[in-house]
Image: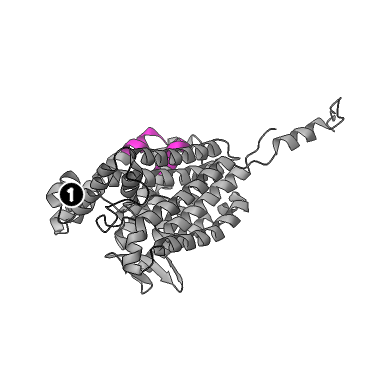
Amino acid sequence: MARREYDPVTGEEIEQKRKLNYREQYFDYSLLLVWIFIMLLGYVLLYSASSFVGLTAMVDSAFYLKNQIRATCFGLVGMIPVIFLDYRWWKKFDKFIYIVSIASVALVQTPLGIESHGAKRWVKMGPIQFQPAELVKIGVIVITAYMISKCSVNALKNIKTCYQIFAVTIVGAGLIVVLTSNLSSAIIIVGISTVMLLVAGACKKFVFSLGILGGGAMMLIVMAGAVAGKSFRLSRIMVWLHPEEYSDSGGYQVLQGLYAIGSGGLFGKGLGNSAQKLGFVPEASNDMIFSIICEELGIFGAVCIMLLFAFMIRRMRVIASNAYDLYGSMLVIGVMAHISIQVILNIAVVTNSIPNTGVSLPFISYGGTSLAFLMVEMGIVFSVSRRIRRIR
């Protein structure tokens, strides 16, 4: 039997004292506070951007804000239990969650599918309406984190192993493109999985080959559309390159967004004083909300919002670095990648840095499904943070 050692001052058993000190509960309140601040700021910005359209179209200036708050309540119902649930529980149901998310995409092509804005991307089951692509993002994060956690560092140096893990992402992203024509969500899903594999230590050959395959796939999609006469993707690229030449069609939204950004100047016109939100910028409360933010708060306000997201990402990186195990770390990396990619893509689209594609600004843009599922993902991050072991 091992000899027990006692503290000469307190008389406590040293090993037991070490365990108690090492297991002090931790929770990242910095991340919680910045998330709450972004949410509250999002309500104010959303109301400002949507009040005119809400009043003219829905006879209620707070129509979109009320729906966003309602979505927040649904998100809290899923988020709070996830926070207090041991994140390792997700391991038991990772395959089930992934399969359900994939199956939900197929439901879009059934009578349950709902068409909106010329695209069939929503599913309505009784009073619940959601976008399956958002569920696939969670499914890919969970199953990719599990598969990576089961591999050794040397295994990830094998390009075959990396592609085996990446295959689950290809299935999800491919179905989303084929069944819902939602290329932006597919790009985000591929980006999430790629970041997770890179952080886990995937081999350089995988990264290089993935870049070549990705670029080739994008070119094939554009060329196939042009040859078939369905040059939707090609037209978006042309609008991106020369928006002023398509001001009466595809370039209208881009130009109006740029006008909003330019007229805001350094400090903006003031909250609520946007002119472009008065029916000029399409989707002012959704994909293009960042342009209204720039107009009302100026470059200074836009930079402040970007810094808030940067701080949120930094806190997630700290949690991922100190997670109890690799699985928890990969879950946080997946959520961090998701939020980072959406913020970057949204701002890039609004500033016409990349071709226009429908990507919302996390926690700020109007969208119930996106907000609710993002809150569940935040719940996973907080769950991982609660199980970080900290020495007093």
> What residue is rendered at 27% in x and 52% in y?
275
> What residue is rendered at 17% in x and 59% in y?
230
Name the quadrant containing residue 64.
bottom left
Residue 180 vs 296, above or below: the answer is below
User: Residue 249 in the image: x percent, y percent?
Assistant: 16, 56
The magenta segment is 194-209
Task: Out of 231 and 200, give the one closest to the viewer.
Answer: 231
* Quadrant for the C terminus in the image: top right
Task: Out of 371 and 218, give the one closest to the viewer.
Answer: 371
> What residue is rendered at 15% in x and 45% in y?
242
* Quadrant for the N terminus in the image: top right
Using residue 356 as the reference point, say whether residue 34 is left or right of it.
right
**What secondary structure characterizes most of the magenta part?**
helix
- Residue extending farthest to the left is 245
Residue 353 seen in the current view = no
User: Residue 361 in the image: x percent, y percent?
Assistant: 38, 50
Q: Does the magenta stretch include residue 83?
A: no
Residue 85 vs 269, above or below: the answer is below
* SS category of the residue bearing label 1: helix
**Disc 1 residue crowd, few under 14, some 14–19, many 20+, Cα 10 Å:** many
Three-letter code for the amino acid on which mark 1 is drawn: Val
- Look at mark 1 in the image and give the residue it sits on: 239
